[in-house]
Image (cartoon, grey):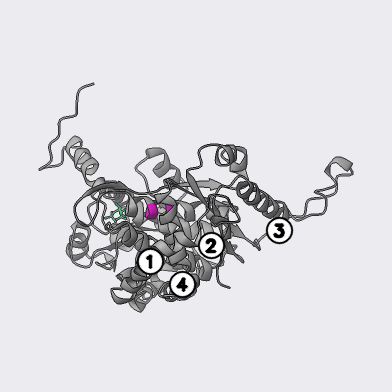
Amino acid sequence: MSLKFDFSNLFEPNISGGLTDEDVKSVEEKVTSAVRNFVENTPDFAKLDRSWIDSVKSLEDWIINFDTVVVLGIGGSGLGNLALHYSLRPLNWNEMTREERNGYARVFVVDNVDPDLMSSVLDRIDPKTTLFNVISKSGSTAEVMATYSIARGILEAYGLDPREHILITTDPEKGFLRKLVKEEGFRSLEVPPGVGGRFSVLTPVGLLSAMAEGIDIDELHEGAKDAFEKSMKENILENPAAMIALTHYLYLNKGKSISVMMAYSNRMIYLMDWYRQLWAESLGKRYNLKGEEVFTGQTPVKALGATDQHSQIQLYNEGPNDKVITFLRVENFDREIVIPETGRAELSYLARKNLSELLLAEQTGTEEALRENNRPNMRVTFDRLTPYNVGQFFAYYEAATAFMGYLLEINPFDQPGVELGKKITFALMGREGYTYEIKER
Ligand code: PA5
């Protein structure tokens, strides 16, 4: 079933100071033109090329041999894998036996060069039954080059052939990893050249590890396809992605510089991380398309319900009114626990209720309290966590990000602000051709 969107708490009269019909009219034409632009110049990420699934499936007979897949990638080359793993597999998937996993693989994602993280994964794997999926679109990201080198070293130390345990996902032509594929004969998948890292979850970047752990990748694409089609509707009221962009753009102009995503599901933690990267890296820009300095963007923040009600909600209700809050709500959980009767009258309001009923009541209560405090909020409801509606979620937010870029008149597909730090790191690590003097303190 499709995702449901409720935007009503972003508008007057539900909240005082909320968006009005006049506000909507002031940007409607520009939003429609963003949608038209999306239809006429459909970005490659929204084309959902069938070859992305086919190329991954062509490796299925090989992948099925592995007990474990370790993804080595960072940013857009790791967050989508994490989002898929956590939202569509049980939280204890990697602790289950192979039989309990119906023969599908465990999936670990090493998306940092933290030696404690890498060691904790290496401690839990047997290299003989492990596939390392090295993912880097550019094929040269330092963090991934380091984790690749470590994985390869371990395989060689075990006397294993790295070509039988490493799969490289990278640009079809360019970069060091592609050179490695050509010169050393590794199996490989392609990152479509026209799809940027943070928009690549539905390409082989996200699909391989998802298939390995038994996620239905066809269904994932079907959900995404439906959402991209809806994102092409000129009637904004039938176009959730356009509504997300329209409301967030208007609120940004009203000083709401923070976009909080608050999910009432632990399995959605990495979906929010995925969103954080998408919104931050795509929209946080110094220059607009005319080359003028604009320093624009909206800071994405994640929060987990009900946990963060005891950490963040005081601020959201009574602190600066500078946030737009998006709730993610799951109606039906895969597992359920009934709260037992304890014989104490003080706890009778909980007895025999489902744990999810309490969680959902907490979501409703928090949303209602924010509304009463005139804090704009919206809700995305998943009937349950399925590949179809997780695919929809990715697609809606990718389209909304493209629309926001259009409204802000910036390029949402580049990330020039990341380059300087990378260059300084290369210089500090002694890479040839890079120099930098750290300022004395
Ligand atoms: O969205 C992006 O382009 C970035 O976050 C990249 O995904 C990230 O920097 C990793 O790049 P690469 O895939 O080239 O290693």
Q: Earlier in the sequence, mark 3 or mark 2?
A: 2
Real-space Cα separation, disc 2 to disc 4, in angstroms:
18 Å
Image position of 143 (left or right of 128): left
* Residue pointed to by mark 2: 88
Q: Which mark is residue 273?
A: none
Q: Which residues are magenta?
A: 275-279
Image position of 241 (left or right of 204): right
Q: Earlier in the sequence, mark 1 or mark 3?
A: 1
* Residue pointed to by mark 1: 31
Name the amino acid type tagged 4. Answer: Ala
* Outermost residue to the top: 441
* Residue pointed to by mark 4: 227
Q: Which mark is residue 336?
A: 3
Ligand 1, by image quadrant, is: bottom left
Residue 119 visible somewhere in the drawing:
yes
Q: Earlier in the sequence, mark 2 or mark 1?
A: 1
